[in-house]
Amino acid sequence: MAYSSTVLRRAIQRLEERRARREREQARTRAHICQTLPQADQLDRALRRTAAGVIAAALRAGDDPAPAIQEVKARSQSLQLQLAQLLRQNGYPADALDDTPFCPKCGDRGWIGAQMCTCLKELCTQEQIGELSKLLDLGGQSFESFSLDYYSDRPWPGETETPRERMEFIRDVCYNYASRFPNFLYPNLFLTGAPGLGKTFLSACTARMVAERGYSVVYDTAVNIFAQFETQKFSRDTPGLQDARDETRRYLHCDLLILDDLGSEMTTPFVQSALYTLVNARLAAQRRTIISSNLSMDEVRRRYSGQTASRLEGEYRVLPFYGEDIRLLRKQRL
């Protein structure tokens, strides 16, 4: 899962802070117990010396270490039982002096060999949702809060479904896309329709669920995405160049990219080329993408290159939105 460098850095920082806090708390607990229960301190020190002392002596003498190991085990078990009983008698947990990590899988290191541990993945997910929340109101946007009440149940001109039937279908598609990600029938979605019909809302719902399942999600507007590609290509030694490189890398390598409001940008030859590169590269790498736009597919074909339109029509499930502007309807009902 290709988390951004910012998300990963913040997650690792939180992991290190949590480990340092746990170590400080355990050090205070140990100091308090050893001060109030000198016998516990003596047993703990003896327990720590036992293994190293006996085995070292056996190895120095050139003897078979097996008997020494058995002696160590017996002595350690006896000391452990005495220490645990003493701690419990004085109101402490039996393992109060143990250096116990929050995560027993990785010992609070965040990695098991070269694999990221689930504890670090969880922190990455939290940081990623925080990043998404800067652009999307994830606090109130979820599939459970998506309402069909604003969509008419009357026939819509030129369509076989009512707006409510259509939106119920699209909601279910987006929910199944997110809940089964990345193995849904349609790997890529193209949400098209007039403003105010719920495209951004459902994009946010999808982003939240996919991110909560531990996948890397990047949401950004077409204007911002193409601006970053332009900075990355044409800028030379400017303060924003490295940021632009990092951002374009995120767009290309995240598990799910949500490109919002395609068509709001100035359509230059460079933008046409950048869009084709982005779409084609993600398709070749089998990375999932959702694009939302006020443009119809006919308008996409006229505005962008034939190659881009062909890939969008052939590789994306097009979901047309129709109905009345939800924002206006809400305003009228206030």
Image (cartoon, helix red, strand yellow):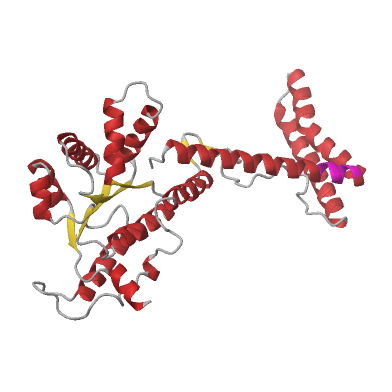
| Image x and y of residue 272, in percent | 16, 39
In the image: residue 21, left or right of residue 9: right
Q: Position of residue 282 (x, y in %)?
A: 24, 41
Q: Is residue 33 magenta?
A: yes
Residue 254: percent from left, percent from top: 34, 42
Q: Is residue 120 visible?
A: yes
Report the front residue among 313 and 227.
Answer: 227
92 in relation to 109, above or below: below
304 on left or right of 66: left
Instruction: Look at the image and give the residue range highlighted in magenta.
Output: 30-35
| Residue at 39% in and 58% down | 209
Count the labels in the image. 0
Relative vertical location of residue 83 with respect to residue 325 in this rendering, above or below = above
Q: Image check: 187 left or right of 245?
A: left
Q: Residue at x 29, y 73 (%)?
A: 329
Q: Nearer the viewer, residue 262 or 215?
A: 262
> Magenta segment, principal secondary structure?
helix
Is 184 colored magenta in this rendering? Answer: no
Residue 106 found in image quarter: top right
Quick check: 65 above or below 122? above
Q: Quadrant of the C terminus?
A: bottom left
Outermost bottom residue? 154
- Residue at screen point 38% across, 46% down: 216
Question: Residue at position x 31%, y 77% from top?
Answer: 149
The reply to whether residue 37 is visible in this rendering is no
Q: Position of residue 122 (x, y in %)?
A: 50, 49
Q: Report the quarter where the N terminus lies.
A: top left
